[in-house]
């Protein structure tokens, strides 16, 4: 039975990280390049920054690939924002990755956090006489590590590693759950890079295996730290010591701070924020920061045992990165005897 | 805040039927292409404004982050249970098709026309004729700004001639005659094939080669 329908194909978002205002400041020229099969004849159609346009170039009978490009008008860096292959019997695929981070520009998460890949397929047929390309699609998983402090800019995505592949032959929704990333790297806390999930059509008589949709999740490392100026169980008898706090790879959406409270360490305690220790990050890439904290005295006023903690709050919750305990003894006790002489 | 500079996705709306045998597309085979801008999710800075800080300090359970060794163990288990391998067997060609679509450089895949401070891109095979006298008008020029084809053409009509072609002509089913091709070459201008105003590639078989050398060009 024929099932006429209007399909909305939602496509890849990989280059968004590259187009974020923080990483690029220029204007872009954008257009759709329609590639007609099987000769791969190209036609450029200028497009506005938002809106609709009717493609007047018929795609029948051999299908066409649509490529949405943006080119930086100054640097000429080009970004393939989106691409899809359309043909009469080629299925329609949509890939979406979701994480715990509500950031909207691109799916992103941290190296230790889970993510979900949702794939929706329509148009697959079960007729054994149909071309193989109409009966199933190919599912690919690529990973790519960013070197050093890389942010994804100027990464050659053609060098991504294919780590697993499979096929889908049923229409509907397919959900793949991942507990954490598989981007390679020895120090698992410091892995950074991206994972890409793609659905490809199989080769048909008009076109080679072509991308139907893909989505990419960006993976950032865990925060690092080094606190100097205080040692475990240090006795503070005068002014509190000045602290030097070095923070690295703070999550792009995070709030990191020092807090103190009286008593022994107790995870989950809501302490007093140490003035000058708060670092708020609201960006697209991890952030490094070096702080000098000189005002511990304003919040540590009583004698006794105190706990100092370094806390970071991210979309994944509040986490205690580090803690130590110190003793404060500032009261002056005068031992004396009073005598009178009569 | 909406950042209108960002296009985030290409959406294609088409009349399609997914039964087999394949149906036709719209009567004219057209597709509706929809472009969307998205909002910049960055909010105002400040603990109260960021979503992370929204998970209020001290609220809910505080934890301690996983360590490298624990992550390595979790990864080992995860790799053994990769869902991609479980959805269905490998299919199609053994060679990874992705590199054909990633890491591409549009500039290298295109012809560049330039004049003054402006440049424009077009499919290489849309450039039907480039007179020797105008060869300096191609290629990337340092300091020039890329603009859309339409904007570039507006300022450079004096040395660019566009010729509208049909799909049949572009694909070689109704090629240019030798006379038509010669007439275009004799214009002394750069000749660009267009379809509804946009530059379109034309198969070489559709545009006969010159039968006579350009003035000043020898045949030896």
Image: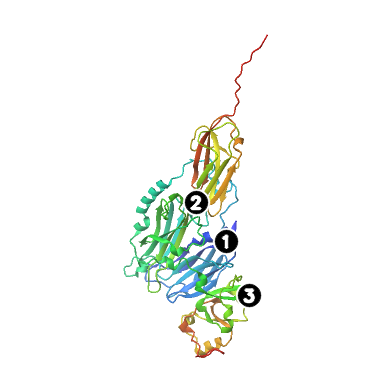
Which quadrant is the N terminus of chain A positioned in?
bottom left
Residue underneath mark 3: B116
Q: Are the residues flagged by discs 3 and 1 from a single subunit?
A: no
- Residue extending farthest to the right is A342
Q: How far apart are marks 3 and 2 (CA)?
A: 46 Å
**Position above or below: A197 against B19:** above
Chain for numbered disc 3: B
Q: What element carries label 2?
A: loop
* Outermost residue to the front: A341
Q: Name the residue under label 1.
A: A24
Up-down relation of residue A34 to residue B180 (above or below): above
Q: Do the residues labelled 3 and 2 touch (CB within 8 Å)?
A: no
- Residue displayed at 55% across by 44% down: A245
Q: How many angstroms separate mark 1 from mark 2 (CA)?
A: 23 Å
Viewer-side label of 3, 2: 3
Q: Residues within 10 Å of mark 2 (few under 14, many from 20)?
A: some
Residue furthest left as drawn: A128
Q: How far from the left and from the top, in percent, is residue B195?
A: 53, 78
Report whether mark 1 lies on the same chain as mark 2.
yes
Where residue B13 sits in the image (x, y, percent)? 49, 66
Mark 1 or mark 2, earlier in chain: 1
In the drawing, does residue A138 fall left or right of residue A239?
Answer: left
Q: Residue A101 carries which label?
A: 2
């Amino acid at each position: 039975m024929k099932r006429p329908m209007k399909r909305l194909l939602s496509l890849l978002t990989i280059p968004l990280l590259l187009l974020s205002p923080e990483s690029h400041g220029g204007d872009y020229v954008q257009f759709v390049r329609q590639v007609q099969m099987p000769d791969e004849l190209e036609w450029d159609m200028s497009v506005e920054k938002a809106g609709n346009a009717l493609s007047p170039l018929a795609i029948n009978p051999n299908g066409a690939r649509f490529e949405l490009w943006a080119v930086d008008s100054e640097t000429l860096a080009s970004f393939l924002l989106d691409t899809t292959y359309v043909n009469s019997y080629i299925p329609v695929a949509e890939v979406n990755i979701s994480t715990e981070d509500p950031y909207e520009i691109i799916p992103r998460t941290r190296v230790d956090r889970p993510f979900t890949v949702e794939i929706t397929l329509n148009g697959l047929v079960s007729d054994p006489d149909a071309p193989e390309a109409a009966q199933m699609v190919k599912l690919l998983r690529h990973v790519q590590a960013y070197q050093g402090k890389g942010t994804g800019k100027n990464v050659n995505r053609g060098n991504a590693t294919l780590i697993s592949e499979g096929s889908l032959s049923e229409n509907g929704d397919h959900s793949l759950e991942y507990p954490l990333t598989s981007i390679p790297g020895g120090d698992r806390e410091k892995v950074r890079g991206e994972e890409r999930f793609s659905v490809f059509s199989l080769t048909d008589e008009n076109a080679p295996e072509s991308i139907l949709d893909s989505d990419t999740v960006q993976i950032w490392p865990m925060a690092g730290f080094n606190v100097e100026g205080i040692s475990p169980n240090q006795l503070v008898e005068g002014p509190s010591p000045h602290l030097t706090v070095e923070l690295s790879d703070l999550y792009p959406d995070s709030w990191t701070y020092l807090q103190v409270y009286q008593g022994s360490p107790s995870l989950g305690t809501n302490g007093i924020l140490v003035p000058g220790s708060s670092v708020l990050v609201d960006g697209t890439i991890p952030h490094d920061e070096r702080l000098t904290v000189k005002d511990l005295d304003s919040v540590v006023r009583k004698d006794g045992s105190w706990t100092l903690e370094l806390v970071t709050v991210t979309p994944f919750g509040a986490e205690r990165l580090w803690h130590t305990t110190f003793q404060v003894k500032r009261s002056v006790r005068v031992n004396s005897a009073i005598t009178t002489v009569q | 805040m909406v950042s209108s500079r960002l296009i985030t996705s290409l959406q294609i709306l088409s009349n399609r039927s997914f039964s087999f045998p394949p149906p036709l597309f719209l009567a004219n085979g057209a597709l509706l292409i929809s472009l969307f801008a998205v909002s910049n999710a960055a909010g105002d800075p400040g603990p109260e404004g960021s979503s992370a800080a929204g998970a209020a300090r001290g609220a809910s359970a505080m934890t301690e982050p996983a360590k490298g060794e624990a992550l390595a163990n979790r990864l080992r288990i995860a790799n053994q249970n990769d869902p991609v391998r479980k959805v269905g067997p490998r299919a199609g060609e053994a060679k990874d098709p992705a590199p054909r679509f990633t890491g591409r450089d549009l500039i290298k895949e295109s012809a560049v026309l330039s004049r003054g401070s402006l440049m424009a891109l077009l499919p290489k095979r849309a450039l039907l004729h480039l007179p020797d006298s105008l060869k300096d008008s191609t290629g990337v020029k340092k300091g020039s700004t890329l603009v859309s084809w339409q904007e570039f053409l507006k300022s450079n009509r004096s040395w660019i001639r566009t010729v509208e072609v049909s799909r049949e002509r572009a694909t070689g089913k109704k090629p240019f005659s030798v006379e038509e091709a010669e007439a275009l070459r004799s214009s002394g201008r750069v000749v660009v094939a267009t379809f509804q105003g946009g530059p379109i590639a034309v198969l070489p078989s559709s545009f006969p080669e010159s039968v006579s050398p350009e003035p000043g060009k020898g045949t030896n």
